[in-house]
Amino acid sequence: MEQIRTIEEINEKIRNGDAVILRADQMTQLVKEKGPEKAAQEVDVVTTGTFGLMCSSGVFMNFGHGDPPIKMQKVWLNDVEAYTGLAAVDAYIGATQLSETLGMEYGGAHVIEDLIRGHEIELKATAYGTDCYPRKEVETIITIHDLNQAIMLNPRNAYQKYNVATNSSNKTLYTYMGELLPKYGNVTYSGAGNLSPLSNDPDYETIGIGTRIFLGGTQGYIVSEGTQHSPGNNMGTITVSGDVKKMSPEFIRGATVPGYGTSLFVGLGIPIPILNVGLAKKTGLSDEELITNVLDYAVPRLKRPILRQVSYAELKSGEIEIDGKMVRTSPLSSFKKAKEVAETLKTWIEKGEFLLTQPGETLPRERSFNPMPLRKTPIVRDVITSDLITVSKGDSIESVAGVMIKKGINHLPVVDGGKLVGIVTSWDISKAVSQGLKELDRIMTKEVITVTEGELLKEAAQKMAAHDISGLPVLDEEGNLKGIITSEDLSKYLGGVKHG
């Protein structure tokens, strides 16, 4: 894409007070009215903003040394434990760490907000004692002004796109996406739509290591890609850092998500320099053009289906359609605060208080997010019967009984055209013989309870108990039949006998 201007040229216009700055929502309107080419000629910088729950957040602190000094082995701030596997009086408090007395009512996120507000914090620390750090315990009161450093370092903030959550099950689910009511009772979503920072530069042309940003009411920086950065799925993330002593409680808030735990609302904004027409077009995208997926959180993570795709315009309307039913939607982010972030950043730039930076390296476009390998936790794949025996839907009961007797088994998956259509047990066969039935289709269980290869053995056992059954067909992630697991298999495995 042909370059119109450089970042340094934009900075010179900012110094001279000549730069034209628009919020992303204003840019959307301008592009709609005049097109991206004319918008690119008129606008120098587009500001973005978001204000939502960002669990992967926290603060590094240095408490300084007393006399005699201590090498903190464990430390608590308002009864919330901070991580101390660092130098003697350094610690990191994470937003989701819970109070040991108040539980979910108070956590690391609230400690961070209280620090920013200048509140007194109770500090307690213990240690094992050494020659150079003889003190073994300390209890004191601190404020943020007593800290030598308070550096926010958030490993994963500002997801480029958030999935939308709903729940098809019969019970209420309490998740990081909030309370999900049964039977598609509600939909929750996050992100700021056309104001969202990474959505305005989805190819990371201007965003990378060293990019100066708005963070919590002060200037911060992008340190690197964030954890779980997955650009191929439009799920980019960033690691960010800033000086907590300069932050404002207007843009950093502790929160409790019922049934899930604590988290931190973070105000974050990124300026997007309009270097070419392509960037003008991307920053001009509307809520109607920003699409995300609706997922069913009642289904295990790796099998979670996409129920439909939806635009932010639909989400913001207050209800969307799922399975012919209109379902109300509710945001977990504040659009009002997101606009405040973008507007504050716009004002800073207009006043010459905030200059743009050329990233030392842009965010990577090639990354994948992989699940944890459960090598020591037994999963279904560890126990699955390797010699898969099936019968066909059209087989006679007599022939199926013969297979069971010959192979010494009590469960047989029933297939039709290679697809699982049922399961039959030796008890089913006995009943059929006593009733004089001949057709397998009449006695097999057609609503089959299944497991996948990657599910925990504990989950398989729970399914058997919940449905009062003793065998489960095993599917791979594509839904192909791979084997069967029975209560006998579980007993043998737990007793130390594994299938070959």
Image: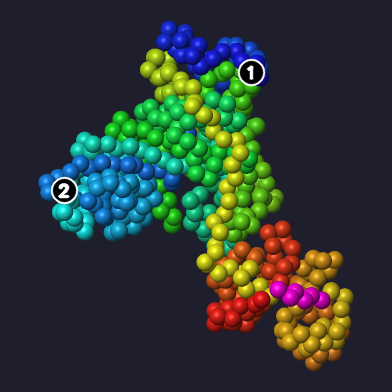
> In the drawing, does residue 22 fall left or right of residue 103?
right
Question: Residue lying farthest front?
Answer: 131
Q: Is residue 125 visible?
A: yes
Quick check: marks 1 and 2 in contact, CB under 8 Å?
A: no
Give me the residue at 56% from left, 13% from top.
5
Q: With respect to residue 475, does 272 lie above or below?
A: above
Q: Position of residue 253 (x, y in %)?
A: 36, 40
Q: Position of residue 112 (x, y in %)?
A: 32, 42
Q: 67 or 203: nearer the eye?
A: 67
> In the drawing, does residue 395 fall left or right of residue 248?
right
Q: 379 or 343: nearer the eye?
A: 379
Check disc 2 and give the amino acid type.
Pro
Q: Position of residue 426 (x, y in %)?
A: 74, 86
> In the drawing, does residue 9 fall left or right of residue 265?
right
Q: Nearer the viewer, mark 1 or mark 2?
A: 2
Q: What number is the disc on residue 69?
A: 2
Give me the residue at 55% from left, 62% from top.
374
First to last magenta residue range: 386-391
Give me the residue at 43% from left, 23% from top.
345
**In the structure shown, which secondary structural element does the residue marked by tag 2 occupy?**
loop
Identify residue for label 1.
Answer: 277
Check disc 1 and give the amino acid type.
Val
